Amino acid sequence: MSQRVNLPADLVEWLAGVACDVDTGAVPAAEILPRLASAGLVRAGVPVEKGGSGGDIVDGIAAIAAVAEESLAAAFILWGQRTYVEYLLQSPNRVLETQQLGHILDGQVAGATGLSNAMKFLAGLEPLQIVAEADGDDLILNGKMPWVTNLRRDGFHVAAAVDQADGGPAMVVTVSHDDEGLVRSDDLQLMGMCSSDTAALTLTNVRIPRERIFSDNAGQWLPKVRPAFAGLQCGMSIGLARRALSEAGKIAGAGRSVLGEPTAHLIQRLDRAEARMYEGLRS
């Protein structure tokens, strides 16, 4: 069955009032993440003992869907933040979680996922675009990330998959906004999502310690996080579909009664699709 989150009334009012301006870039992206975090949405589905509000990954998806009903661009930011949280939760690197999770949950620092390239790499669709070379206890990274969302200028961490220069297994690491050699481009001009802090990154001899490794074997670790990665993405589609069906229902009155039956049918189909996905994620 469908799972829903009731957003705070003041957040709904704000999102409804700025949704179009968020799309065009008239509202600074910097205003969005703090509002989502202060409403507790990043904590949805995160264990209480780790600073979250409890529940499971389905609660995280439901939070993203609720925001997407008001603003898809704002939900895009929440997706990036919550997905980075999931990487911290599922990584065997507890030191990294301790260092970063609190600041990510409260929105002080943005979390971004640059792993779309990695998911395509796993499917054999494209090579990894960053190479890591060992230098003592550090890694030296070179390459690029053509576009990543939620690269907040006030501070961000971004997950990236990297090939090893010596031919070892690919790894998943995190780099930060203030790493020397990391350059963020100007915001990319996306249709309908201009205020999403989406930009490209170039890495030139970026040095990071090994404590920044999410996993030293991407081929083994990424399939474990992929269900949550894809499920959280689906939250955006679910919210958008709900809003479209809601709007269709509002105009299915006199003269448009023909819309009533197919709209009701689509709502049932959406509920069933959600239920199947949630059952799969929980198993």
Image: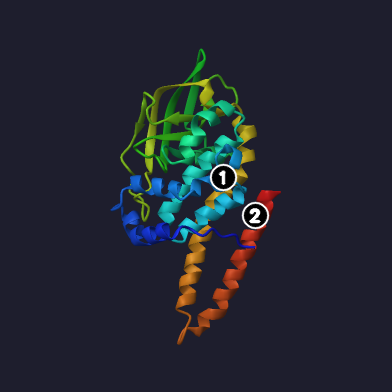
Residue 270 in which image quadrant: bottom right
- Picture coordinates of residue 260, whole percent (x, y): 54, 80
Q: Amino acid at mark 2?
A: Tyr
Q: Is residue 39 above or below residue 238?
A: above
Callout 1: few (<14), some (14-19), or many (20+) C-alpha neighbours within 10 Å? many
User: Is residue 69 shown left or right of residue 19?
Assistant: right
Residue matched to label 1 = 229
- Picture coordinates of residue 261, whole percent (x, y): 57, 79
Q: Nearer the viewer, residue 55 or 134?
A: 55
Q: Is residue 272 above or below residue 216?
A: below
Q: Are marks 1 and 2 in contact (CB under 8 Å)?
A: no
Q: Dot 1: what SS? A: helix
For the N terminus, the image quarter is bottom right
Q: Residue at x 40, y 46 (%)?
A: 33
- Picture coordinates of residue 211, whole percent (x, y): 53, 23
Q: Residue at x 34, y 47 (%)?
A: 31
Q: Which residue appears farthest toward the left when viewing the image?
A: 26
Residue matched to label 2 = 278
Query: Can residue 123 be spotted in the picture?
Result: no
